Image (cartoon, rainbow, N blue to C red):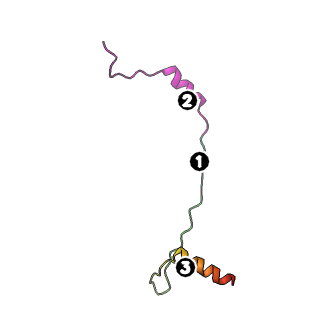
Amino acid sequence: MSDRGCVRWDEANLVENEDNRPVRKNIFEPKTPFHQMIEKDDTSFAIPDFVDVLVMLHMLEL
């Protein structure tokens, strides 16, 4: 009978791998804070462009 198309498991290797596998730990990370940008009258405002932020920071340094 041909072994083509059949899977042969190396049982000894599977047992050895199971015995030697590292302990896995869960990594608990806090959720990323999210602040929705909505004004008090429930209308959203545009997020400033990067250039606008740089200009504002430069003006503050003067």
Q: Residue furthest left?
A: 1
Amino acid, disc 1: Asn
**Residue 52, label in figure:** 3
Q: Residue at x 69, y 81 (%)?
A: 61
Q: Earlier in the sequence, mark 2 or mark 1?
A: 2
Residue 53: percent from left, percent from top? 57, 77
- Which residue matches tag 2? 18
| First along the sequence among labels 1 and 3 | 1
Rounded to the nearest angstrom, the CA distance separating label 3 from label 2 is: 57 Å
Residue depicted at 52% across the width and 78% down the height: 48
Mark 1 sits on what residue? 26
Q: Is residue 37 above or below residue 19?
A: below
Give me the C-alpha separation between circle 2 and circle 1: 19 Å
Which mark, residue 8?
Answer: none
Question: Badge 3: few (under 14), some or many (20 or more) residues near its Cα, within 10 Å?
Answer: few
* Rendered residue at 31%/14% (across/down): 2
Type of the residue with mark 3: Asp
